[in-house]
Amino acid sequence: MAFAQLIYSLDINIVFVALPEIGAGLGFSGQTLQWVVSAYTVFCGGFLLLGGRAADLLGQRRMFIFALWLYALSSLVGGLAWSPAVIVIARAVQGIGAALLFPSTLSLINRLFEEGPPRNRALAIWGGAGASGLTLGSLAGGVLTSGYGWPSVFFVNVLLASIAIVAAFFVIPKDAPRTERRSFDLPGALTVTAGATLLVYALVQGPEDGWQATPIVAALVLAVVFLLTFALIESRSRDPLMPVRLFGNRSLVAGMAVTFIYMGTFGALPYFLTVLFQSVQGYSALQTGLAFIVPSLAIFTGTQLGARLANRLPMRRTLVIGFGVGIFGTLALAPAAFLGAPYAAIVPGLVVSGIGQGIVWTAMWIAAASGVAHLEQGIASGMASTTLNVGNAIGIAVLVAFANRGIDGLQGEALREELVIGSQHAFYLAAAGLVLGLLVSLTFSPKASANAQTRAAA
């Protein structure tokens, strides 16, 4: 399951490095190339809730293996793509595969490992694999693209997913047989998938097309209509896709709020670090990948520390510590962002911020799974991962708009200076968002924290 998370994380970054070659090889225009990334993001965000519920109703291991098959086949088509339309469709299907894989993997961990120290350690390993995948994605993207061409960044997924599929049959227990018949809530599934997909589309494309553009306004209006319809359906359904009673679980609600804030702040930092490394300091793609090794190792360390803290302290305190460390580290990034700055100047901020990220990453998934029945772990994971995805889209949109206010028409040295100022402002705004995350952490259920601490002591 950690290996599957490594594949999921690796694919987030591996395509970025290959984008120029993909654009040149398939004849993309400057405006359409972004859809190689956006198609994945939009469909992943739109199908997460459906993927989580499918894991509950159809079987977690079954959906885990099906998602890997979808990943492998869409990656094969992506590597063989002969036109822009084919590769964008392949990336959309990859996004659906990711939307099925992430909640099924997370719900398998929550089902197979008992709540408390065993699950906390498993989530730390899973989170550490994800941090490793982000770094490997940047490095592998540069090495594979330069050595074997852009199709290789897709073909490597075929090999890795195939290994995971074979391993799953041997090491993951079969799904328990279903004794009761349950409906799939098709109206709820259709409305929430349409609403979430349109919302993520608007958030991803809004900064590019302009928030007043007709397609963006229409997408937002339709998203609201579909999501309100979904809420009405769920309130009246006998077997809802997303049971309303789950919102009575304070741990889950707090966990969802934290995942939203996490990706809107911590999750946006790599974008601005990439701008600093490449557009300001002039790093190559491979140098940028190497520069991300330090923060990735720090995040990996933080995930392991997060599990240890969660086993010894109330969850509320663990989250507060993680956000506190993250705030300090993120603030330290701003003064280290200047023209001609040596890499060593930004390392302390990267390390401290990364450790904070890792602590919160492990703790927030523990929080989201606390007190949720095994048969509803999939939908709980889907709910938390949906807010994660939406938070990332909103966070990047807000921070990029805030940071890029003064770059229109600038070139050369003036542009680089403005990018530095914008990145500094983004780091400060992200730190302010982390303060909000710290305050939300204080609302975490003391009862759930006490239960986790009792299990740790036992």
Image: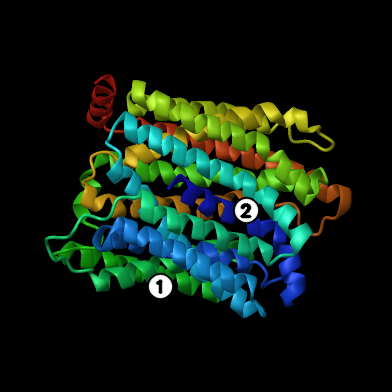
Name the spot of residue 222 as percent of width and height, x first.
40, 73
Name the spot of residue 435 as percent of width and height, x first.
48, 33
Secondary-structure class at tag 1: helix
Q: Is residue 238 above or below residue 256?
A: below
Do we see residue 48 in this rendering? Answer: no
Q: Say which residue label 2 marks.
A: 13
Secondary-structure class at tag 2: helix
Query: In terms of sequence position, does the residue under pointer 1 or pointer 2 come before the other?
Result: 2
**103 left or right, relative to 149:** left
Q: Which residue is found at the position 68% from the left and 51% from the top?
A: 140
Q: Amino acid at mark 1?
A: Leu
Q: Nearer the viewer, residue 94 or 244?
A: 94
Q: Amino acid at mark 2?
A: Asn
Q: Which residue is found at the position 81% from the left and 59% from the top?
A: 409
Q: Nearer the viewer, residue 97 or 199?
A: 97
Name the spot of residue 110 as percent of width and height, x first.
31, 43
Q: Residue 222 got which mark?
A: 1
Screen quadrant of the C terminus: top left
Residue 193, quarter of picture: bottom left
Q: Is residue 438 above or below residue 205?
A: above
Q: Which residue is found at the position 38% from the left and 24% from the top?
A: 317
